[in-house]
Amino acid sequence: MDTNDSKKEKDKKQVLLRLSPSLWKELAAWAEDDFRSLNGQIEYLLTECVRQRKKSKKDDTEKI
């Protein structure tokens, strides 16, 4: 990653997120299991979902 990419990663955007108490408990427990903060866990999960979506779209276009 070059310095521009590094700078972009440091300039993170803030998002207000409302979660149900049960979802919050599940995510907090999962984060603890993975040795992450709750915020880190949510960011990790969203990043993985975006990667899978991109991969899925790429796979779909290759089938055409």
Image (spheres, rainbow, N blue to C red):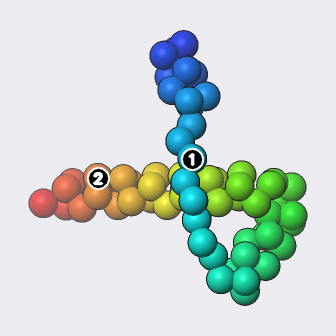
Q: In the rendered image of this protein, does residue 18 appear above or below residue 53?
A: below
Q: Amino acid at mark 1?
A: Gln
Question: Which marked residue is nearer to the observer: mark 1 or mark 2?
Answer: 1
Q: Which quadrant of the figure has residue 57?
A: bottom left
Q: Position of residue 49 (x, y in %)?
A: 49, 61
Sequence-wise, which precedes: disc 1 or disc 2? Answer: 1
Q: Position of residue 41 (x, y in %)?
A: 71, 58
Q: Amino acid at mark 2?
A: Lys
Tell me what residue is drawn at x 61 percent, y 28 percent: 10
Say what secondary structure mark 2 lies in.
helix
For disc 2, the neighbor class at 10 Å (few under 14, some 14 to 19, many from 20) is: few
Q: Position of residue 28 (x, y in %)?
A: 80, 70
Is the N terminus in the top left, top right, bottom left or bottom right quadrant? top right
Mark 1 near mark 2, Cβ–Cβ under 8 Å?
no
For disc 1, the neighbor class at 10 Å (few under 14, some 14 to 19, many from 20) is: few
Say what secondary structure mark 1 lies in.
loop
The residue beneath circle 2 is 58
Relative placement, left or right, of 37 versus 39 is right
- The answer to whether one can see residue 18 in this image is yes
Relative placement, left or right, of 29 versus 61 is right
11 and 52: which one is in front? Answer: 11
**Measured Cα–Cα span from mark 1 to mark 2:** 29 Å
The residue beneath circle 1 is 14
Tell me what residue is drawn at x 36 percent, y 53 percent: 54
Q: Position of residue 62 (x, y in %)?
A: 21, 54
Q: Which quadrant of the figure has residue 15?
A: bottom right
